[in-house]
Structure formats: C-alpha cells, structure tokens
Image: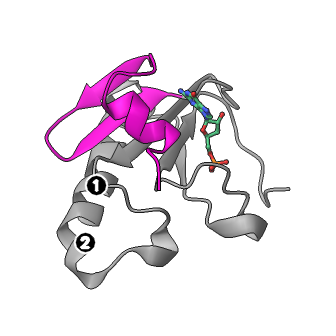
Amino acid sequence: MGETLFEKIIDREIPADIVYEDELVLAFRDINPQAPVHVLVIPKKPIPRIGEAADEDQSLLGHLLLKARAVAAELNLSEGGFRLVINNGRDGGESVPHLHCHVLGGRALNWPPG
Ligand code: 5GP
C-alpha cells in the first residue's frame, strides 16, 4: 500500500501548517476547518484507524491524547473548552485512513453531531 496523505505531510512531501511535532506525533491545522481552531493530531506510526490500534499502541495512544490536550491549551482553548473527535470507518465519517484526533474549539460546538 502507498503512503497515506498524512504520511506525506509527516515526510514534508505535502505542506501543512504544523503546530506541534515530536518523535511520536505531529499536529497540524485542518485544511477545511470546522471551527476557529481545528487541528489534527496524528501518530507518526501509520495506524489506519482506532479500530485497528493494537494493545502495543497503548502508550502511543495515551501520548496522542495528552498532546491533543497540550495543543488545545497552547491554542488558548482551555478556558472555553474544546472537543476531541476520532472518526472511525464509513459510518464514523472517516475520510483519511491514518489515525487522527481532531481538536476543535473557539466556538460553542453542537451536540449531538450530525
Ligand atoms: P476525517 O474525516 O477522516 O475524520 O478527517 C480527515 C480530515 O483531514 C478532514 O477534516 C479534512 O479536512 C482533513 N484533510 C484532508 N486533506 C488534508 C490535507 O491535505 N491537509 C490538511 N491539513 N488536512 C486535510
């Protein structure tokens, strides 16, 4: 299987507005933002979706969530609040087969989602 879109962003083959990077994860602004702040936090390991994560990914997934929290704080969402979303599969609305956690904030978000 070829590289996913997000692997190309990790490898700098496709440009992105990167807001955080370490050895395990990358965070960049979504190209089609659904809120004033809309960032995607992805593992550098190409896990297709949360439904295919393995037990061995436990610490990586914890790291991903904590970095999503850190990105939200860095982008001034702590006080007003924010939402983390992981879409999985067709009915979940997943469109890129590389695990990503959406960080959304900067406005009041509706619930339930559409
Ligand atoms: P999903 O629908 O799979 O949960 O989320 C995929 C997200 O990736 C969408 O919100 C979409 O706007 C975003 N996206 C798709 N292609 C690109 C791209 O080339 N660059 C960036 N920064 N975001 C992208």
Q: Is residue 66 left or right of residue 105?
A: left
The correct choice, above or below, for 52 with respect to 112 in the image is below
The magenta span reads: 1-29
Q: Is residue 11 left or right of residue 93?
A: left
Dot 2 falls on a residue whose secondary structure is helix
Give the Cα separation between the discs numbered 2 and 1: 9 Å
Judge whether residue 15 is colored magenta. Answer: yes
At horizontal 43% and vertical 44% (from top left) the residue drawn is 3
* Place of residue 100 in the rendered image (x, y in percent of width and height, measured from the top left): 47, 50
Q: Is residue 81 visible?
A: no
Nearer to us of marks 2 and 1 is 1
Residues 49 and 27: in front is: 49
**Are the two marked residues, 2 and 1, in contact with CB atoms closer than 8 angstroms?**
yes
At horizontal 73% and vertical 58% (from top left) the residue drawn is 93
Q: Any mark on residue 1, and which?
A: none
Q: Residue furthest left?
A: 23
Which quarter of the figure has residue 71?
top left
Mark 2 or mark 1: name the one nearer the start of the chain.
Answer: 1
* Place of residue 104 in the rendered image (x, y in percent of width and height, measured from the top left): 57, 38
Residues 22 and 3: in front is: 3
> Counting other residues with Cα less than 10 Å from the Cα at mark 1, is it few (<14), some (14-19), or many (20 or more)?
few
Q: Which residue is mark 2?
A: 57
Q: Which residue is mark 1?
A: 45
